[in-house]
Amino acid sequence: MSKKNVLTVKNLNKIYSKNGSKTVNAIKNLNLEVKEGEIFGLLGPNGAGKSTFINILGGSVMKSSGQLNVWGFDIDKNPRQVKASIGIVPQEVTLDPFFSPRKLLDLQAGLYGIKKKDRITDTILKLVSLEEQANSYARSLSGGMKRRLLIAKAMVHQPPIIILDEPTAGVDVDLRKTLWENVKSLNARGVTTILTTHYLEEAEKMCDRIGILNKGELVALDTTKNLLERIQTKIVSFLIDKKSNIINKELSSVKVIADDENKLIISYEKSKISIDEIILELKKEHIKIFDISTDDGDLEDVFLRLTKD
Ligand code: ADP
Ligand code: MG
């Protein structure tokens, strides 16, 4: 059962040319597909071209070449239908401080020509947990609430696709979690979600598939699971009954991180040695193992490898 593509990007290029100074090739021959219902993450270091891509979709930046199809509409032939199909949550928070969330959503609905009776203001406010603040001035909202209000604003015309540019940049850890939950619940309602982030943890927790952009080039495109599989370095800690001599053994790729009476922490490359072989070495020393825990590493390993110069 294959789901249909809701976004198809073919040979997309963006060259910024500034007067007098040299040009910036911000997107280089990007090819990408996003499927209905998924959470797709576009990752990359600062300057990778993430916002440029989002802004091309949103219509505020003109592509230099290539094709973009959103929800079945070509961006060159049907720009209005493309606009109606997506809700964009921009990277920068820009809100009129004297509008309340309800007022702001009503204005936005007006902009999209949505009749009063067809508006779902309360539903949206509830979705982003801002019911209680519905009538407060935007300036009195916390940073996290403002972000949520921007998400709400992007939902007003009920687009099937929502695109979030760095949704949690500058948001503290607790609020980040709340935001993730909000986005997940939107997605659970069937909204295809595309987000950019440079927080790897965010991508790992949220995204079904990930594309990694580096200097305008797509350097990886895979499921989050497969990308994590590529991680080679594993860390394992053992709770043991006496000090091990493993540090003095020549075991391929094994590095000792901590080496106490009761605790041994090592790292190893899974292509070089298996956990079985390591356990066997400890058994040879007649060491009792009370507990083993492993740290699978995270996307950071993959990311650093793919985006380093
Ligand atoms: P990201 O969002 O991944 O941090 P951006 O899309 O903002 O990356 O930027 C990609 C590249 O394009 C950077 O080199 C940036 O300096 C350049 N760039 C972005 N916007 C403009 C612009 N309006 N004019 C010229 N260069 C730009
Ligand atoms: Mg950006």
Image (cartoon, rainbow, N blue to C red):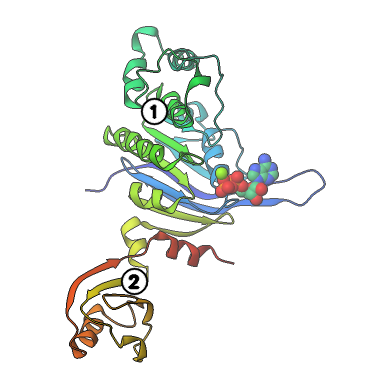
Q: Is residue 83 above or below residue 257?
A: above
The quadrant in which residue 163 appears is: top left
Q: Amino acid at mark 1?
A: Pro
The quadrant of the picture showing ligand 2 is: top right
**Residue 198, numbered circle:** none
Q: Position of residue 89 (x, y in %)?
A: 48, 32
Sequence-wise first label, 2 or 1: 1
Q: Amino acid at mark 2?
A: Lys
Q: Is residue 51 left or right of residue 158?
A: right
Give the camera-side residue of 49 and 197: 197
| Label 1 CB-ligand 2 distance < 8 A | no
Task: Report the mark closest to the observer, 2 or 1.
Answer: 2
Q: Residue furthest top?
A: 116
Residue position marked by numbered label 2 in the rendering: 234
Is residue 65 in view from this perspective?
Answer: no
Q: Is residue 32 above or below residue 96?
A: below
Is residue 95 in view from this perspective?
Answer: yes
Which element is circle 1 on? loop
Give the camera-side residue of 50 and 71: 50
Q: Is residue 23 left or right of residue 76?
A: right
The residue positioned 41% from the left and 21% from the top of the image is 156
Residue position marked by numbered label 1 in the rendering: 159
Q: Position of residue 268 (x, y in %)?
A: 35, 77
- Callout 2: few (<14), some (14-19), or many (20+) C-alpha neighbours within 10 Å? some
Q: Position of residue 52 (x, y in %)?
A: 58, 43
Give the camera-side residue of 251 and 111: 251
Q: Residue furthest right?
A: 20
The residue positioned 46% from the left and 61% from the top of the image is 303
